[in-house]
Image (spheres, rainbow, N blue to C red):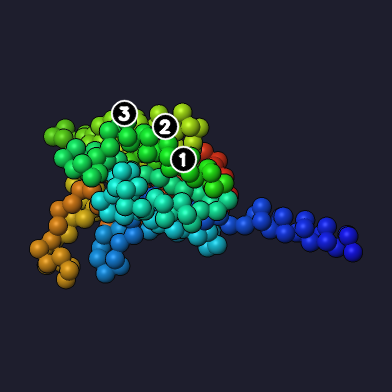
Amino acid sequence: MKLPLLLLFSVLSLVSATAAPRIFMAGDSTMADKPLDLPERGWGMALGGFFKAEVVVRNHALNGRSTKSFIDEGRWAKLAGELQAGDFVIIQFAHNDEKKEDPKRYADPAGAFRDNLRRFIAETRAKGATPLLTTPVCRRKFNAAGKLVDTHGDYPAAVRAVAAEEKVALLELTVATAQWLENTGDEPAKKFFMWIAPGTHPKIPDGRKDDTHFVAAGAEAVAGLAAKQIREQKLPLAQWLK
């Protein structure tokens, strides 16, 4: 009887070791799920399309959230409470942390912002899961010379510093999206963002000119940049990419 039990244990161990992972996402509106009857898309909605079908993506990102408000509203506690060993958590903030005029969201890049990232990392690891930090995606903002203008100040550097300090994998989306947008060009890049002409969408009758939030093509492009970096860095998730 001992041999069959040992064989069963070995099989179960093998299955557990090769089980498809769950990917959790914590972030802001550029990553978040959006209503399907609107053209706006967060890049987290598109990420699953780059992985094999058995990989589960749980997108907890939400519009308007910073590291501070994500914690204060209990959203991080909810995400952390769902984590299990073997999960991955992709963390992207800055767009709202940088809003000094809003004390409910502002987090200093040299202080609270870094502390909040460290908390996310520590509590993810405590569950046996793996954190991945992501520098924020760029806005479409060009100067008169056709060069992309930085809008995130010290936040990308803060993410890089915490990633290095905590030895966490980093998806460098600030640099990647800047190169992508500059290669595309100012006017052509509008097709990736919420530039909606008046009268072209029933739920946005007056149109919109939004250089922060993506339509489907933009979300898919950014998710593709993230997947490319996962593959190039040979991160554990890479084996599950299509």
- Is 213 in front, or is 77? 77
Identify the residue at horizontal 30%, vertical 67% (top origin).
36
Cα distance in 3D space between marks 1 and 2: 10 Å
Crowd tier of the residue under label 1, counting other residues whose Cα lies within 10 Å: few below 14, some 14–19, many 20 or above: many
Q: Which residue is mark 2?
A: 162
Image coords of residue 212 (percent x, y)? 23, 48
Helix, strand or loop at label 1? It is helix
Which amino acid, mark 1? Ile
Q: Is 218 located above or below residue 116 in the figure? A: below
Q: Of tags 1 and 2, which is closer to the observer?
A: 1
Neighbour class for label 3 at 10 Å: few (<14), some, many (≥20)? few
Q: Is residue 61 above or below residue 95?
A: below
* Image vertical order of residue 116 relative to residue 46, above or below: above
Measuring from the top left, give residue 176's x and y in whole percent.
Answer: 36, 39
Indicate the amino acid at tag 3: Ala
Callout 2: helix, strand or loop?
A: helix
Residue linked to disc 1: 121
Is the N terminus in the top left, top right, bottom left or bottom right quadrant?
Answer: bottom right
The first of marks 3 and 2 along the sequence is: 3
Going by the image, does 206 lie left or right of 181? left
Q: Tell me the residue at 42%/39% (across/down).
A: 119
Q: Are marks 1 and 2 in contact (CB under 8 Å)?
A: yes
Query: Which residue position is annotated with label 3?
Result: 110
Badge 2 local density, few (<14 within 10 Å), some, or many (20+)?
some
Mark 3 and mark 2 in contact? Answer it, CB < 8 Å: no
The answer to whether marks 3 and 1 mark residues whose Cβ atoms lie closer than 8 Å is: no
Q: Earlier in the sequence, mark 3 or mark 1?
A: 3
